[in-house]
Image (cartoon, rainbow, N blue to C red):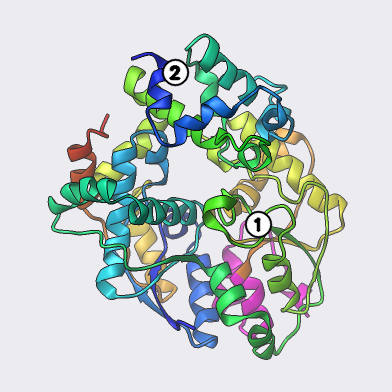
Amino acid sequence: MDLREEILSEIDGKTLNYCFSCGMCTGGCPSARISDSRYNPRKILHRAVIEGKLEDDIWLCTNCYTCQERCPTKTKVADLLSLMRRIYVKEKGIPDFIKPLVENLEACGFTAQIGELENKRRERMGLPEVKHNTEIKKIIEKTGGGL
Amino acid sequence: MTDKYAYFIGCTTPFRVSNYDLSTRKVMDKLGIELVDMPDAGCCGLYYELINEKTYLAMAARVLSMAEDLKLDLMVLCNGCNGSLFRANKKLKENPELKGEVNEILAGIDRQFKGTIDVKHYVKVLWEDVGVDKIKEKVTKPINLKVAAHYGCHLMKPSEEIMFDNPKDPASLDELIEATGAESIDYYDKAQCCGGYVLAADKDIAYAMTGQKLQNVKKAGADAMVTVCPFCNVMYDANQKAVESAIGQELKIPVLHYPQLLGLAMGYEPKDLGLEQNRARVDPKMFG
């Protein structure tokens, strides 16, 4: 499916049509400021509309929602960025830097493996034990969210 | 006022900052708020917002269903968990078709999302439900320090959904800090994100962002920084040394979880609040 059509088929995606490329999102974006506009949400939205292209820079969004709060047309900029990342995953798979997190979730239900060491520390602090679960693995399998 | 909550600690807190969990339990106890543990609750689903929406919603709905079974609202410690669980709860309550699809997935693990509870970050519980006045009544050892508040992002944003405080000019955490006797100072770029979310994707951007904020906090003359999210805390505290190397400046800024600051003001000893586990050194003598 065409990227634009795919974005517009989602609830949050419909607001892509509100964007008139004013750049308020990028003007307030901490990631744009620090990366010298290597990350540029205005450009990313524009590129999606005009060229129908997704590139790796979408992963530099810090998900802080400053863009979305500032947007004068109520375009859900941050939600669009999350949506574009989900479309990216559908096309190209889960990026390497997220893989360990998925592996941990499948192994124990937490994003990090909380093992004996952490639980011993918790016990010394008088805190209850944290227990692994297998339900999250089942959810990931059933929804096709695995590696 | 609800005085009993299902208590969700997420992943980062037990893995990296159990002193956050410890100090939260202490202050809630003093305020007469009972916390019911969910030891196998696991992850809220946050990162799956970027991977697969069905997985995200089902993971969040699973946690929500556990609180529903307890017939209690859910209290969270983490801004990330707050954003993820609050928004999933809202989305599923408002969209019966989506709720049906998610419940088909949850049926495989004998769970069901009903939509009967609310999700609250503990800052919301303290500020809206308990109230600053009642907190002040419990302060026996006022703090005499200048503190820089860090609200983080998903406590209030996206504001059209979360509808808590005012992200353009927030007051909740500043008032909660001042309730301890401390002065909550203004500083440049107070609303800026910690950068933690891009740490895995681009460490340079993340550390530069963390470093800028720590520099601003230092410039403003703060004695300490206070966070209300385990991941923001890890960025400013545990990663402070790495950030110092990245920006080439020594910072040495003590970073406390808010319940540690409140706990000290309530008369708890530093050890009761796990203060010795904070990574940037906190001198207990600074609290008088």
| Helix, strand or loop under label 2 | helix
Location of residue B171 (image quadrant): bottom right
Occupied quadrant, residue A144: top left
In the depicted structure, whether residue A86 falls above or below residue B170 = above
Q: Label 1, label 2: how many angstroms apart (C-alpha)?
A: 35 Å
Q: Is residue A37 left or right of residue B186?
A: left
Task: Please identify the quarter of the rendering in which residue B211 is found.
Answer: top right
Numbered badge on residue A47: none
Label 1: few (<14), some (14–19) or many (≥20) C-alpha neighbours in 10 Å: many
| Rendered position, A55 above or below B5 | above
On the image, numbered disc 2 is attached to which residue?
A4
Measured from the top left, where is residue B161 in percent x and y? 52, 52
Q: Nearer the viewer, residue A143 or B183?
A: A143
Pick whichever, A7 or A32, lies toward us.
A7
The residue drawn where x is 23% and y is 55% is A133
Q: Name the residue under label 1.
A: B151
**Which amino acid, mark 1?**
Tyr
